[in-house]
Amino acid sequence: METLMTPPLIAAALGGYLLGAIPFGLVLSKLAGLGDIRAIGSGNIGATNVLRTGRKGLAAAVLLLDSGKGAAAALAALALLPAEAGPLASLIAGVAAVIGHNFPVWLRFKGGKGVATTLGVLLAVAWPIGLAACATWLAVAALFRYSSLAALLSLAAAPGYALLIDRPDTAVAAGFLAALAWARHHQNIARLLKGEESKIGGEKG
C-alpha cells in the first residue's frame, strides 16, 4: 500500500478537500433569492435544510451537486493521478471531499453533515456499496420517516457492505465517514432519543 505522504496522494487529498468545500447549498440559495441558508431552519448548508424553504427543486439540485462533488473527487483522482496511486488515491480524495463539505475553509470550517457527499463517494468508489447504502436510506426513511435516522443507519451499514463486497481499505474509509457523520449528527441523535426530531413532512416524532 502507498505511503500517505506521496505527492499523488497529497494532491488527491488537497483536490478532494477543495472540491468538497464548495458550499452548493449556500451558493444556490443566494442565487435563488433566499438569502443566507445558514439563517434558515437548522442553519445547515445541506439539502435537508434547503428543503425547509419549500423549494423542492432547489433542494434536489443541492442534493445532486453535494453528492456529485464527492463522486467527482473520487473519480477525478482515479482518472488524473498516476495509475500506481490507484484506488487508494480515489478513497483519499473522496474522504477529503466529505471533510471539505463538513469543514469548508471558505465558511470558517462550519459546513454541512456530509451525508449526500458520502453517498456520492461510495457510489463512485464501489457502486454496489453506494447503491446498498442508498437503498438502506430509502427503506429506513419509508419505515420511520426520519431523515437523520435513515442517514445514520445507512452510513453505519456501509462498512459492513464494503467488507462483503469490496476491499478492506474501502471498509475503513466507509467506517471513518460513518463515524464522522454520527459525530456531526449528535444533536439529531439527542432529539431522536427524546422523541423531538422532526419527521419527513415536518411533524415531530
Image: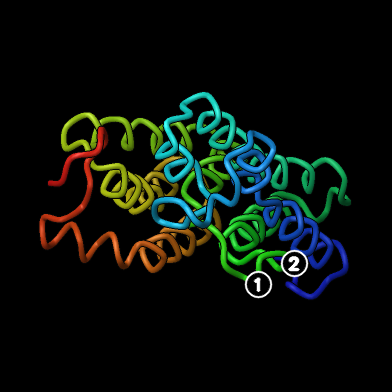
Relative depth, front residue between 129 and 26: 26
Q: Residue at x 66, y 64 (%)?
A: 104
What residue is disc 1 on? Answer: 108
- Which type of secondary structure does the marked residue at label 2 adopt? loop
Q: Residue at x 22, y 41 (%)?
A: 199
Q: Is residue 38 above or below residue 28?
A: below
Relative depth, front residue between 117 and 155: 117
In which quadrant will I find the N terminus? bottom right
The quarter holding residue 96 reads bottom right
The quarter holding residue 95 reads bottom right
Residue 38, horizontal then vertical, whole percent: 52, 56
Q: Is residue 57 above or below residue 194?
A: above
- Which type of secondary structure does the marked residue at label 1 adopt? loop
What residue is disc 2 on? Answer: 2
Q: Is residue 131 above or below residue 168?
A: above
Q: Residue at x 42, y 42 (%)?
A: 48
